[in-house]
Amino acid sequence: MPGTRWTRWTARVPHVVAVLPWILASAAVIVLIFLLVTAMVAVFGHDRYAEHGPGSRSEAVMVPGVPVATTSVLPSPSPTRTRRESGGRPGDAAPPAGRPPAASRSATPSASGSPSTAPPSPTPTRLLNDDDPGISYRGRWAVSRGRPFGDHRDDVHYTMHDGDSFSFTFTGTGLDYITSRDPEYGDADVWVVDAGGRPVRQQRVSARADRYLPQQTVFSVRDLPRGTYTLWAVKRNGVYFQVDALRVRG
């Protein structure tokens, strides 16, 4: 009978209403646990290459292998365009040298005609960011920007794949390879050859440290005869391999 069926359904309503708070409470507990796990992953994930703050971004860049040029890709630095090594941003001109001393006005004829001598200019240096077009990246590299860790210009190139490398051809007397140190960073093989392909310096360097240390010089070669050289660096182990900046010594 219809009345009997309706009576059975209405009789079940109190049971459903009684169970509904338990169902809602269980769903709330599940959502709370999910949010807690997500927060713990964000705090302890140690991902220094994720997005950091408004306007920041982490871009994947696939760079094809480019043969290293045997000639310099950088113009010979001019003393009038010298960039300061510290205390200013790349591109700032160094302070002009002082005026040469005036000729002596002594009564001695030989002194009155002596030529003036300008003070020697300092050795020019250039600090290049990791996105400089002269740096060739080979492998599966990515770019991390807007980093709040103290890196040069707050960005780095990095890779997680052993065997990936970068190279840079420069003209000068030396070069510094600047990167960061961290417990997750490993070793890299770095070497420098001259314009004829003859090795000048070869070294395995380590970027490991107990904590994150930005802008560390892990490889340096100096006092070379002024000429054209090429630097190569290859990732050997560790989680990350990173390039922050290169300092060229003229």
Image (cartoon, grey):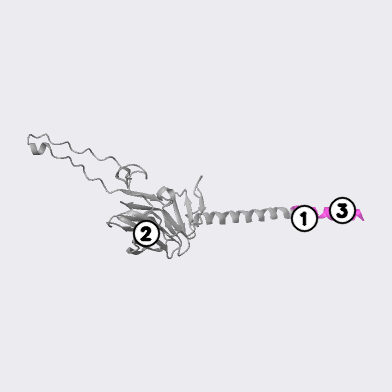
Label 2 Cα neighbours within 10 Å, binned few <14 / some 14-19 / many ≥20: many
Residue 3, image x, y percentages: 90, 53
Give the magenta range.
1-17
Q: Residue furthest right?
A: 1
Q: Is residue 15 visible?
A: yes
- Whole-angstrom CA distance, mark 2 to mark 1, is 77 Å
Q: Say which element carries label 2.
A: strand
Q: Which amino acid does the dot numbered 1 rest on?
A: His
Q: Is residue 5 in the magenta section? A: yes
Work out whether residue 224 or residue 17 is closer to the camera in this orientation and state it: 224
Looking at the image, do the residues carrying marks 3 and 2 touch, with CB atoms under 8 Å apart?
no
Going from N to C along the chain, the mark reached first, 3 or 2, is 3
> Observer-nearest residue: 5 or 234?
234
Residue type beneath disc 3: Trp
- The answer to which quarter of the image holds residue 205 is bottom left
The front one of 55 and 6 is: 55
Check the picture and name the quadrant holding the N terminus. bottom right
At x 42% / y 54%, what residue is drawn? 135
Q: Read off the residue under disc 1.
A: 15
Answer whether residue 139 is magenta in the image. no
Circle nearer the N terminus (3, 1) = 3
Q: Residue at x 75, y 52 (%)?
A: 17
Q: Which mark is residue 47?
A: none
